[in-house]
Amino acid sequence: MGRGWDGGFDRFRERPQRAAYDEKEAVPDIDDEELFSKKSAEGIDYTKYEEIEVKVEGNTVQPVENFSDLNLHPKVKANVEMYGYKDPTPIQKYSIPNSLEERDIMACAQTGSGKTAAFLLPIMHRILNSTKFGRKKSRGYGDPIKPLALVITPTRELCRQIHEESRKFSFRTGIKSCTAYGGQPRDAQLRQMSRGCEVLIATPGRLNDFLENRNVSLADIEYLAIDEADRMMDMGFLPQIDRIVEHSDMSRSRQTMVFSATFPKEIQSMAARYLNEYVFITVGRVGSTTDLITQKIVYVQDFNKMDALRDFVQNIDLGIVFCKTKVMVDRLESNLDREMRVSSIHGNKSQSQRDRALFNFKKGFSKLLIATDVAARGLDIPNVTHVINYDTPNNIDEYVHRIGRTGRAGKKGTAISFVNEENGPVVSDLIKLLKESKQDVPEELSKLESFGGGGYGVSKPRRGGSGGRFRTSNSYERNDGYNR
């Protein structure tokens, strides 16, 4: 295989077919038929869910074992059946019955655990039974838009994905869902909302903009869901969320649900301020990962990562590669694009470019998505088989969030992480996580820890690596059947 200029004339071989659509084109809307064309339950190993520990605190109700046991509005129940839902995931078993009883909920669950349906199904049920739905007054010129339910989420990509799920559950109900996020014209979003908006799915920045300009009022909000709360904390959004929840005209009699993969003190404080006598649900160990993900650690120096990546991606069906910089994302795309179909997203990409890249990836037109951490959370692509940490993060929570893009909804996945002495700060935490997830810990990784691997984000002086699979030489070896 050609290696850039080192490959001689190999680099002038016929390039692979480009993605089906150019990233400058607009992403087509998904029609109703396509919306329901892929059933939710395909490929899910439900037996794995029985092994997951669930802890519940507070005045809770009994969990359900089947969606048919839920007392959902008939129209919502019909959409659940149409979408192929049969057996609820652990978070759905416990949170939906409590939500239908109008209890506030604080839920900690891994990514890919079915959290979106856990808050959207009760929202649709509540709206259809609301006295405000169906008898709204006509809006006068300049009057603010008043949704009945609000979902706050950290990223544009997650906004779009939740909106897609919302359309499925509100199909033929008359409930209209809208989005509000940066990177798109605000006037176009307001026009969409003016045609009807019962469910508003928004990022904090754009929502605050609409509130400050009195384009939107939260006075009629009956249901509030905050998704990926810890991610929003990491992104510095908590002050904006406080302005939305505590300093707007939002109704105090609302029902509130907060979802988070981890439960740091800032999120605990949020729960104490926003929730009333809430039910606390923990699915699995907070901040841990699933044993459905096979984690492989590969020692490789930075200047050899490109060769290692080329070898690993040859047999990948659908994979995400994470880098720490936008420059590296562009560099990898440029190199790999000569050999296979790839897409990329990062913060400097326009919204239309990011939408197009995700569209091509989800449709299978691109087999590889190269991304910075902007995509580490919120992406809900059920068939991702591999995640590769080209640049392994030195924060264990970020590592968990990244590899959570595979092994979703009961499916198996593989996470491959390139490490060297630069990853010393995360080695100790990584070893603990591997043990908790019942994964093999390479002996050489333990040696790397003893040679300077820190823990909990504290870097120790780093000396050389060790032998075996983890080398300080210019070569690398794959482990667990990946030997080069």
Image (tube, rainbow, N blue to C red):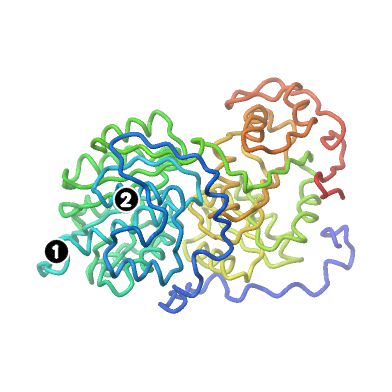
Callout 1: 10 Å neighbours few (<14), some, many (20+)?
few
Instruction: Determine which quarter of the picture holds residue 213.
Output: bottom left
Q: Secondary structure at mark 2?
A: helix
Q: Residue 259, how many percent across, how many down?
A: 39, 44
Q: Residue 353, how many percent across, how many down?
A: 52, 64
In this view, the residue in front, 13 or 396, is 396
User: Residue visible at 32% across and 53% down?
Assistant: 151
Q: Residue 404, how many percent across, how many down?
A: 57, 48
Amino acid type, callout 1: Gly
Q: How many marks?
A: 2
The residues tagged by marks 2 and 1 sit, at their Cα atoms, a distance apart of: 39 Å
Instruction: From the image, state whether disc 2 or disc 1 is nearer to you.
Output: 2
In this view, the residue in front, 285 or 295, is 285
Residue hosting label 2: 97
Checking the image for residue 95, the label placed there is none
Checking the image for residue 142, the label placed there is 1
Is the C-beta separation of discs 2 and 1 under 8 Å?
no
User: Residue visible at 24% across and 63% down?
Assistant: 198
In this view, the residue in front, 185 or 49, is 49
Judge left or right: residue 58 versus residue 134.
right
User: Residue visible at 31% across and 66% down?
Assistant: 76
Callout 2: 10 Å neighbours few (<14), some, many (20+)?
many
Q: Is residue 96 above or below residue 138?
A: above
Judge left or right: residue 426 versus residue 110.
right
Instruction: Determine which quarter of the picture holds residue 430.
Output: top right
Amino acid type, callout 2: Pro
Q: Residue 295, how many percent across, how many down?
A: 68, 44
User: Mark 2 or 1 closer to N-term?
Assistant: 2
Q: Secondary structure at mark 1?
A: loop
